[in-house]
Image: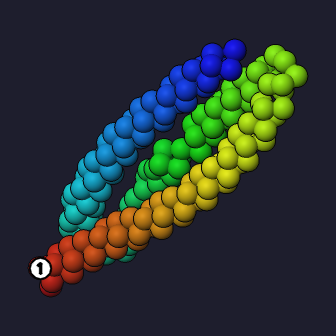
Amino acid sequence: MVIGHTIADAVAAAAVALTILVVAVVVEVVVVVVLAVELVVVVVLVVVVVVVVVVVVGVVGVVVVVVVVAVVVVVVVVVVVIIIVVEVVVVGGGVINNSISNSCCSSSASSSRSGSSSSSSSRSNSSSSISSTFSSSSSSSSSSRRRRRRRRRTVVVIAVVHVLVKVVVVVVVVVVVVVVVVNEKT
């Protein structure tokens, strides 16, 4: 019975490790795709801003350009915030990691409990293994929580830098185009 439980625990641990590996690969792919989409969105927005600024300055003047620039900056910020939220949710992966760790702990606890009810001699052994399993799982879960918190903080810092860079790029492009067009008209 003890050998059977050990084999079952090893198989369950291998399945959980394989699942975590697959989830990590999927997360990396999704992050790369999200970053590519983000770059395309920024390039398209800069092109649209340049075209709109040239057309608006040529037709109605600089006052409307300020309104258009404000609207475009708001659109850029909203799009980037949406992308950031996706990045934080995907890279953080709190729901997936929590569900995996909870299922792992519950399966190991249930298997240890079933092994502890087999006989009186194995009951003491399995109770000690249960306590060691719970202590090791609690320490590993606390360390994984700390790692997830660090990862989320890093992602939030990178996201804020992304927002600032995109807003600065759009504003600089708009200012340069406005200055060039106004100089050409005067």
Residue depicted at 59% across the width and 52% down the height = 144
Residue that label 1 marks: 184
Outermost residue toward the right in this view:
120
Q: Nearer the viewer, residue 185 or 18?
A: 18
124, 139: nearer the viewer: 124
Would you place residue 70 above or below residue 94 in this image? Answer: below
- The quarter holding residue 186 reads bottom left
Q: Is residue 157 left or right of residue 97?
A: left
Amino acid under disc 1: Glu
The part of the image, by quadrant, that contains residue 124 is: top right
Q: How many marks?
A: 1
Q: Is residue 145 visible?
A: no
In the image, what residue occupies the spot 20% across and 73% down? 177
Q: Nearer the viewer, residue 84 or 72?
A: 84
Name the quarter where the N terminus is drawn: top right
Residue 67 position (above or below residue 6): below
In the image, residue 184 sits, relative to residue 88, either above or below, namely: below
Element marked by disc 1: helix
| Residue 46 visible from this viewpoint | yes
Label 1 Cα crowd, 10 Å radius (few <14 / some 14-19 / many 20+):
few
Residue at (43% x, 56% y) in the render:
80
* Residue 54 drawn at (x, y percent): 20, 65
Residue situated in front as seen by the camera: 63 or 98: 98
Q: Position of residue 87 (x, y in %)?
A: 46, 50
